[in-house]
Image (cartoon, rainbow, N blue to C red):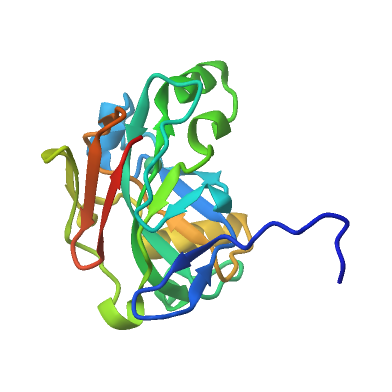
Amino acid sequence: MSYVIDPPPVASLPVRGSEAQFPVHRIYCVGRNYAEHAIEMGFDPDKEPPFFFQKNPDNLLAGGRDFPYPPKSQDVHHEIELVVALASGGTNIATDGALDHVYGYAVALDMTRRDLQGVAKSLGRPWEVGKAFEASAPCTELVPAADIGHPAGGAIWLDVNGERRQDGDLNQMIWKVPEMIAYLSELFTLRPGDLILSGTPAGVGPVARGDRLHGHVAGVADLQISVV
Ligand code: MN
């Protein structure tokens, strides 16, 4: 196979305990999957089921590198999230057994240009300008489920400059991980290498250049980055 231009590199994440990388196919993100966060965004979690949007694989910022404050925004928010990485996929996957498709887990930030997302929402436009920009998905190394199992509960929090901003528990997810996989697989053909960002607990807010962010998911990983 030859290409008329150089092909882009394969987006990937490091894997704890391995020299090999995890290649990333797509990034699905679930919105408003923690009730308290849905409420803080002005929605009723009982009336607003979660929904999905996507980021681009090359939006990943791996390895604890600095997060560059993006252009065209004065209101960039942090959203700490558990990442689910798929080793296999398919369509119409049953909830029972959905976890068999999971390779492992990671911790990521769904960085959001909230001002641009707000304009898009108000005009009924797509969210890419708010969600799918360069470096908008800082992410830790993947941790294989073979090593840690499948976390369904446990602390998820984010500190900004040592102060707790987001604080929740994985057991507060409205849609659980197996339900997300099953639902997505009815809409899309899931593939090995797909990531799912599973939503964020309450407490989202703005970041500024110079901020130090420390995110944590119990039993999974810690994500520490600076905003530059
Ligand atoms: Mn999010």
Residue 193 position (above or below residue 123): below
Q: Is residue 192 left or right of residue 164?
A: right
Q: Which residue occupies the foreground of this view, 216 or 124?
A: 216
- Tell me residue 184's x, y (percent): 53, 57
Quadrant of the rendered structure where residue 44 is? top left
- Tell me residue 26's x, y (percent): 57, 57
Quadrant of the rendered structure where residue 77 is? top left
Report ligand 1 position as a quadrant: top left
Residue 25 position (above or below residue 210): below
Residue 101 position (above or below residue 170): below
In the rendered view of the protein, which quadrant contains the C terminus?
top left
Residue 52 position (above or below residue 131): below
In the rendered view of the protein, which quadrant contains the N terminus?
bottom right
Q: Is residue 134 left or right of residue 66?
A: right
| Residue occupying the point 59% across, 24% down | 125
Q: Which residue occupies the foreground of this view, 186 or 225?
A: 225
| Residue occupying the point 43% across, 68% down | 14
Q: Is residue 198 left or right of residue 60?
A: left
Q: How many marks?
A: 0
Q: Which residue occupies the foreground of this view, 122 or 138?
A: 138
Q: Farthest residue in the left direction? A: 163
Q: Is residue 78 left or right of residue 60?
A: left
- Tell me residue 147's x, y (percent): 29, 81
| Residue occupying the point 40% across, 38% down | 111
| Residue occupying the point 43% across, 77% down | 97
- Tell me residue 67's x, y (percent): 39, 41
